[in-house]
Amino acid sequence: MSDKQLFAYDRRAFHQLVLGGMGVAAVSSFAQTTTATEPEQHPQSCGEAVQRLISGNVRFVSGKLRHPHSSELWRERLTAGQQPFATILGCSDSRVPPEILFDQGFGDLFVIRVAGNVVDADVTGSVEYGVDHLKTQVVIVMGHEGCGAVTAALQSTDKQAEEPKEIQSLLSKITPALRDLTTEGKFDTRLASGVDANVRWSVKQLNAIPDLAKAVRDQRTIILGCVYDLRTGRVRTL
């Protein structure tokens, strides 16, 4: 796929992502370039924050990484404090590093990683910290294809019972997302549906947190669900 095709695809995704009235910058700015040594201006809106993530993933997929915000001077600047523009709740899977697949640097992302990108009290508190104290303008819940935690949760109750109680506790946080899935068909198809359903479940849980819901209503942040494709490197939105 050509760079032009990638650009067109993600421009459509961007329009689908951004809520009306958020004052987003023109999509044509996707084509603008900034070298790794030039600090990018902090996003001025939720839409701009989403745009930056999409643009970074386009660079990753096309092999044109900038590796921004990684210089010694930039790291020195960060000793005075951090101002990440996005909170990412992702899976612990070693194949899904958010900073790389979104082509972001030091201080750009506030990342929470837990197997199955599940939501519990600790995760909720971390996301709230990102939004309330660090003022992150977008919260991304990012699952990925072939997720091992979702795979285990889809397996029979007997197999789950063979796991240590701590893993069983983790899987129990995924199970509610899978209740409406069909039990028929190929397992790979069911797993793909389960990954999507699990992301949507985590997004729903976060949207139910009062202060996060208020931040969304006030257009101070936006909560989105995404899934990473291990083969293509592309992040798609739900």
Image (cartoon, rainbow, N blue to C red):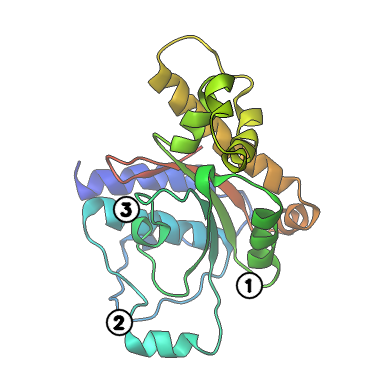
- Whether residues under marks 1 and 2 lie with C-beta atoms below 8 angstroms apart, the answer is no
The one of 142 and 160 positioned closer to us in this rendering: 160
Left or right of 76, for residue 122: right
* Residue located 62% across and 54% down the image: 222
Label 2 neighbour load within 10 Å: few <14, some 14-19, many 20+: some
- Whether residues under marks 3 and 2 lie with C-beta atoms below 8 angstroms apart, the answer is no
Secondary structure under badge 3? helix
In whole angstroms, how far apart are the C-alphas of marks 1 and 3?
Answer: 26 Å
Label 3 neighbour load within 10 Å: few <14, some 14-19, many 20+: many
Which residue lies under the disc numbered 1? 134
* Residue located 52% across and 24% down the image: 159
The one of 187 and 139 positioned closer to us in this rendering: 187
Task: Specify the label residue 37 is tagged with.
Answer: 2
* Residue located 54% across and 34% down the image: 163
- Tell me the mark number nearer the camera, choosing from 1 and 2: 1
The one of 188 and 42 positioned closer to us in this rendering: 188
Dot 2 amino acid type: Thr
Which residue lies under the disc numbered 3? 58
The one of 99 and 113 positioned closer to us in this rendering: 113
Label 1 neighbour load within 10 Å: few <14, some 14-19, many 20+: some
